[in-house]
Amino acid sequence: MKSDLKSDYKHYNKFYDHLDFMKYRNVFFTFSIVLTMLGIISLFVFRLNLSIDFSSGTRVDLEANHPLSIEEVSRTFEDSGYQPERPVLAGGNQNIATVRLNEELTHQEIAQLKSALQDRFNAEPNVSTVSPQVGRDLAKNALFALSLASIFIIIYVWIRFEFLQGLTAVLALIHDSFFIITVFSLFRIEVNILLISAILTIIGYSINDTIVTFDRVRENIKRTGKRLTTLDEFGSIVNLSIRETLTRSVNTVLTVLFPVIFLLIFGSPSIRTFTIALLVGLLCGVYSSICIACPLWAVLKVKYLARRKKKRTVRTEG
């Protein structure tokens, strides 16, 4: 069966013929499980470095007409009676400072702080505060958005293909999203609302690659004209389908990866969270689409067919 299928695709690169993704499926699954366990441990030990978008606090953005220093900015806040976190400097000549305070300031305190900063740096700062309730609402809405997107993806793939393919596609997306969160937890990168935007973007790219591969799987199954039942038969279809779409998947992610890398190097620090999440998510997304979604579907499909055959046998004997 495998040779008959491959005879229809002689124009594919011979190098791909040696790639056996099903053979190393347990290695891929183990690697992903280890990463997931590492992420769970990291979240328990280090937790997430939440910005004021998801926790209460105050953010102060200051743009001066001269270069700033971390010590100068920190000392100004301390003189005003606050203990700020380490300021983040940006701008071509380091004239932009972003400072976070853990406490929520009142209108009077904001006015006093603005006056002190304006007197010191001759520039009016932008001060924004988030209450604990707003932070909880933002976190709840973010989780709701991700959950809703996953449900609709399962429904769409279920209608377009089958339920098991929709399930494995969403499991691959959860794998990608959780790996991004793991990286942010391990490296203590600040988590803000841009992370949710990045994760939703990655979901779009990752599910696109997965659906293209599943579509090729369906075409190749129809091409065989046989009823597949064993893991070897499904494995042959999965390997062939991945090989046929591999070049497209890699080229697609590279066309997005290069701009993201340049944005990370030359872009504004204000979008660094977004670009880091995109970079990690794109790499993880192409890995999960190729090495997780389709091989996992083949394994689950064979187990499902075996259970259904067993039920039929029991029903017939009964």
Image (tube, rainbow, N blue to C red):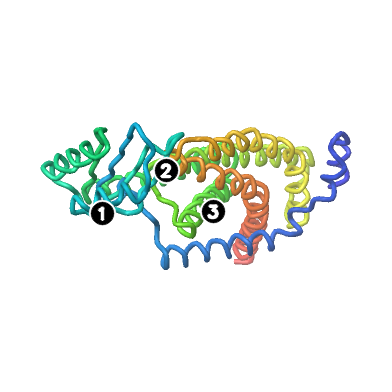
**Count of numbered circles on the image:** 3
Within 10 Å of the Cα at label 1, are there few (<14), some (14-19), or many (20+) other Cα atoms?
some
Q: Closer to the camera, 248 or 118? A: 118
- Where does the image place residue 19, in percent across and percent down from the top left? 80, 50
Q: Closer to the camera, 259 or 1? A: 259
Q: Secondary structure at mark 3?
A: helix
Within 10 Å of the Cα at label 3, are there few (<14), some (14-19), or many (20+) other Cα atoms?
many
Q: Which residue is mark 1?
A: 102
Q: Which residue is mark 2?
A: 196
Whichever of callouts 3 and 2 sits on the residue coming sooner in the sequence is 3
The residue depicted at 76 percent of the width and 48 percent of the height is 239
- Where does the image place residue 20, in percent across and percent down from the top left? 78, 53
Whole-Å distance between the Cαs marked 1 and 3? 32 Å
Q: In the image, what residue type sits under mark 1?
A: Asn
- Where does the image place residue 1, in percent across and percent down from the top left? 84, 47
User: In the image as oriented, which residue stretches furthest toward the left?
Assistant: 108
Image position of 282 (left or right of 96): right
**Picture quadrant where residue 110 is located:** top left
